[in-house]
Amino acid sequence: MAIDLTNLSQTELLQLVNATPLGQVLTRSRLRRQLDATAFRFGDGTRIHFVKYVRWLVTEHDRPRAKPIDYVEARKRQANRNRAATKASQDIHPIPEIVDYDRRKAAGQSFHLFCMTYFPGVFWRPWSEDHLRVIGKIKRAVREDGLFAFAMPRGSGKTALARCAALWAIFYGYRPYVCMIAGSQDNARELLKPVCTFILEEPLLLEDFPEAMYPLRCLENSSKRQLQQHIQGRLTHVHYGAHQAAMDAGAKVAWPARLDGKKGELSAVQHAMNLRLRMGPEAFSAECQNEPMQEQLHDEVLMPEQVCEKISGRPRGEAPLACTKITMFVDVHDRLLYWCVSAWQEDFTG
């Protein structure tokens, strides 16, 4: 029976190709892959044009092949792909839009409304007259400047108000920096914990302050992620870089190049602050600033009477005959020198 080479079924093509002395050179699965890859170049998906099929095979055989790459080059390309994927995952673009601008604007005019709107789980009881007076003082201190002290009973919400006042001042730009002070380092950590919880979990803060909240939420409570977080290639510099000039103002460094770029440090000032956080203020002042800050205990204070007891009564500049050695030291300060000359006997008395 005659075969139409321009209109073969898959079975007919397999029988024809595999009927040569070479034996089986084409399988049904391989033919299926060829049909899927060629997009009907030599058939309609069911019937096959044999001449076109052979022409396609010759073209594929003569097509230049990519040169094989060695193991080192393969690792390099994979590393580049991994870096590109990581960088893409660190891009937090786009920043969400503000959900309710009117709500945000109204809370900016009233600290009382800010607390009630964004922290209903904290301030769920009705306010007392004392609370309202404190809220009014906080509003004036934040927006107009000023100092005040106000005593309230324990558990009345004064610490919660202080935390929310710090966020209110920063979110609306009333104050570029806010310092919350506690009685000890442990108390300071406890003071900040609820603030971190607000930032990570309060849904309305994310809705109305996305420019501040969204980059922090994307860190997923990992400070290391802020090092390379960016918006379309522009680093967000969470915690420092966005206000570096203002935060560095007034600081003087002896070695501007002392910073670790691999850790994301942008300046020697930031490096110094990282050292201070890691070492503690006492060790940093003593070892990095050469200005120990440890207070002298009362029983260690040298009294005038103790100094007088050490005076020998011998005229200044005169050494006893029994002394055979003279030593001196000088303690150099910015504006004066402390010095002493001593004469010693062989038994180290003098």
Image (tube, grey):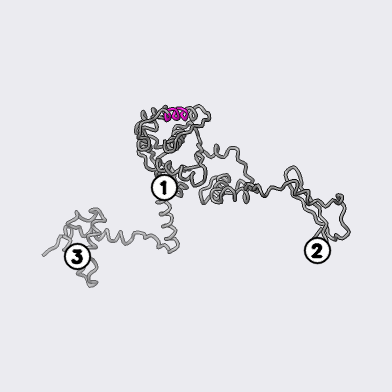
Report which residue position mark 2 lands on.
Answer: 347
Q: How packed is label 1: few (under 14 Cα within 10 Å), some, or many (20 or more)?
A: some
Q: Which residues are magenta?
A: 130-139
Q: What x and y, as percent, mark residue 85?
A: 40, 51
The image shows residue 243, relative to residue 43, as above or below, that is above
Q: In which quadrant is the C terminus drawn?
A: bottom right
Q: In the orientation shown, which residue stands out farthest toward the left?
A: 1
Q: Give the dominant element type of the magenta stretch: helix, strand or loop.
A: helix
Tag of residue 49: none
Look at the picture and state if 227 lies above or below 70: above
Residue 54 inside the magenta-drawn segment:
no
Asked if the residue at tag 3 contacts the one at tag 1, i.e. Cβ–Cβ closer than 8 Å, the answer is no
The amino acid sitting under disc 3 is Leu
Q: Secondary structure at mark 2?
A: loop
Q: Earlier in the sequence, mark 2 or mark 3?
A: 3
Q: Report which quarter residue 69 is drawn in.
A: bottom left
Q: Say which label, 1 or 3, has the lower sequence index.
A: 3
Q: Residue at x 56, y 51 (%)?
A: 279
Q: Is residue 134 magenta?
A: yes
Q: Amino acid at mark 1?
A: Asn
Q: Nearer the viewer, mark 1 or mark 3?
A: 1
In contact (CB < 8 Å): disc 2 and disc 1: no
Mark 2 neighbour class, 10 Å CA radius: few under 14, some 14 to 19, many 20 or more: few
Q: Residue 14: which disc?
A: 3
Find disc 1 in the rendering and name its residue.
221
Which numbered mark, 2 or 1, is in the foreground of this view? 2
Q: Is residue 91 left or right of residue 292?
A: left
Decide which of tag 2 and tag 1 comes sooner along the chain: 1
Q: CA distance from mark 1 to mark 3?
A: 61 Å
